[in-house]
Amino acid sequence: MCRIERVILLSIIMFSSCTACTSSNPTEHDGKALLQQKLDRIFRPPFSIVTFAKIKGQNNAQDGAQVYQMDFTAQVKYPGNEILCTFPFCPQLNGSDLRAVVDKANKSVAITGRLTFEKAQNGWVGLL
């Protein structure tokens, strides 16, 4: 094996081992997708998430599992005169994980809160 082939082979091995060792955290896109799943259980359609921003995130250990908690803000729009909830008064939006302020004039809901992901073998799983 010539020197160039050895350098290329070593580079490939080093790159493979480095990418296998890194563990990326959930992204803003992952957070928006998890919020969509949560809101699908809270609101009756139609509605849409028009903005989503990750404020901060942190890794923690919880009950022996590795978790990632993402604080966020989001803006939800709805076309009707009122946002329609699965349960009267949308009780899920006033808990410890989600808080909402409805702006009827703009047909929107400002949501802040914390999303939790748990580390699994194949990546992160959002907790509903």
Image: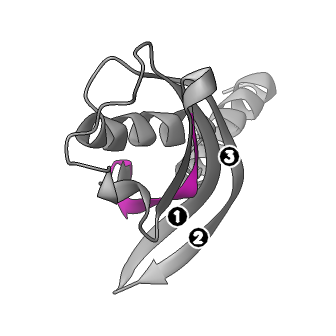
Check disc 1 and report the residue beneath it: 68
Is 52 covered by the magenta stretch? no
Q: Quadrant of residue 81?
A: top left
Relative to 69, is 1 above or below? above
The type of residue carrying mark 3 is: Lys
The type of residue carrying mark 1 is: Tyr
Q: Quadrant of the N terminus?
A: top right
Q: Residue at x 40, y 42 (%)?
A: 34
Task: For marks 1 and 3, give the one nearer the viewer.
Answer: 3
Q: Quadrant of residue 19?
A: top right
The type of residue carrying mark 2 is: Asn
Name the residue at the left extreme.
87
Q: CA distance from mark 3 to mark 2?
A: 14 Å
Give the number of the disc on residue 128: none
Q: State if disc 1 and disc 2 touch (CB < 8 Å).
A: yes
Q: Quadrant of residue 47?
A: top left
Which portion, as a residue range, is magenta?
A: 109-124
x, y (%) of residue 74? 61, 38
Q: CA distance from mark 2 to mark 1?
A: 4 Å
Residue 8 visible in this rendered orientation of the protein: yes
Relative to 71, is 44 above or below? above
Q: Residue at x 34, y 86 (%)?
A: 63
Check disc 3 and report the residue beneath it: 54
Residue 127 visible in this rendered orientation of the protein: no
Q: Is residue 89 left or right of residue 11?
A: left
Name the element at disc 3: strand
Q: Residue at x 49, y 38 (%)?
A: 30
